[in-house]
Structures are given as C-alpha cells and as structure tokens.
Amino acid sequence: MKVLALSGSNADNSFNEKLLKAIIKNLDYKYDFDFATVKGLPMFKEGVEAPKEILDLGEKVGDADMILIGSPEQQHSVTSALKSALEWLSSSVHPFHDKPVVIVSTSPMPQGAARSQTRLKSILAAPGFSAHVFNGDEFMMGIALQQFDEEGNLAEPGTLKFLNHFFDEVDDWYAQLTK
C-alpha cells in the first residue's frame, strides 16, 4: 500500500515530523511510504490559481492509497500552514475524494494534540474533501520531549506496542473500506 505521510507542521524541529519519520522507520516493511510537508507552501488565497507546489502535493495525495497526517496543535487547532494547504487542496484540486486518511499527533503537552485531531476531522468533513477518515483508536502521543531518543527513534516500548496495534486497526479498517 502506498502511504503519503504528510507533516502538518512548518516548525524547524517538528515533533510531528519526527513522529512520522519514526512511523516510516518502524513500518517500512508494511507500507510503501512517501513523505511530504506543508512547510514552505504558499498561504491559500481565494480566487487564485493553485501554484505548482500545491499541484505537486495534490498529485502526491492523489497517487497514494492512504494519507497519514501528522497534525500538530496550535491554539487548540490545526496549524495555519496545514489549514492553508488543505484549503488549496479542497478548492483548486480535489485529491482527497474517497481517499482514506489517518491522523496521528504528538505534543510536548500530555494530551498529545488531541484538539488538533478533532479539528482536523471536522475540516476533512467539509465540502471539497469527501475523505474517509479513520475513527478507531486515536494515536495522540503526549510529552513528546521524552518520547524520542537522540536518533529520533521512539524510546518507549509501550508506545511502539500501541503504534503497531493502532496500525493493525488501520489495516482492518482499510480492508473493509476497499473491499
């Protein structure tokens, strides 16, 4: 399965980007990953043709079997960079139509960006998306500063165990969705 891991952060040292890269490293035997980021994309402007960077991202989304979004939380919501990219992708092009989407998040705070996931699910339910969002167990990793070792690996065995359980559920959901 081709999975696009999309980082919703524009931070230089993004914990959510680290989380996606750790997932890619731990599950590369299971999925064919591609990585993309919203970092550096132009802000959405209504009535303007989508720039090449957005069209390229839309093509990556369209080519993937499933999208895995790492969604940081800012001010109890998704980042402005992620929201802007999604606005482009729901107005200029529509690559999320019938696309399976899975959301993961991490945060320095204990709640693990839970509100970001809730807001993102609401955004993906808006007209222009028509995505299929995974709503089983949620992967929200709190206290991100303690979750990674020096090489960016997930340091807690319990986190790795839950990550594998989470993606087993995702696989079951995907199989039901695509049969």
Image: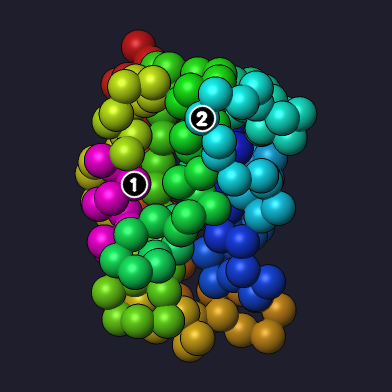
Could you tell whether 135 is left or right of 98 in the image? left
Give, as a single range, the part of the protein colored magenta: 114-122
Q: Secondary structure at mark 2?
A: loop
Number of marks present in the image shown:
2
Foreground residue, 179 or 98? 98
N-term mark: 1 or 2: 2
Residue 137: horizontal and vertical position, in percent? 24, 51
Q: Quadrant of the N terminus?
A: top right
Q: Amino acid at mark 1?
A: Leu
Residue 13: horizontal and vertical position, in percent? 65, 75
Main secondary structure type of the part rendered in magenta: helix
Q: Amino acid at mark 2?
A: Glu
Q: Is residue 120 visible?
A: yes
Q: In the rendered image, which residue does mark 1 sit on?
A: 120
Residues under numbered marks 1 and 2 in contact, where contact means CB atoms less than 8 Å apart? no
Foreground residue, 48 or 24? 48
Tell me which corner region of the image, top left, top right, bottom left or bottom right, holds residue 172.
top left
> What colour scheme was applied to this rendering of the protein?
rainbow
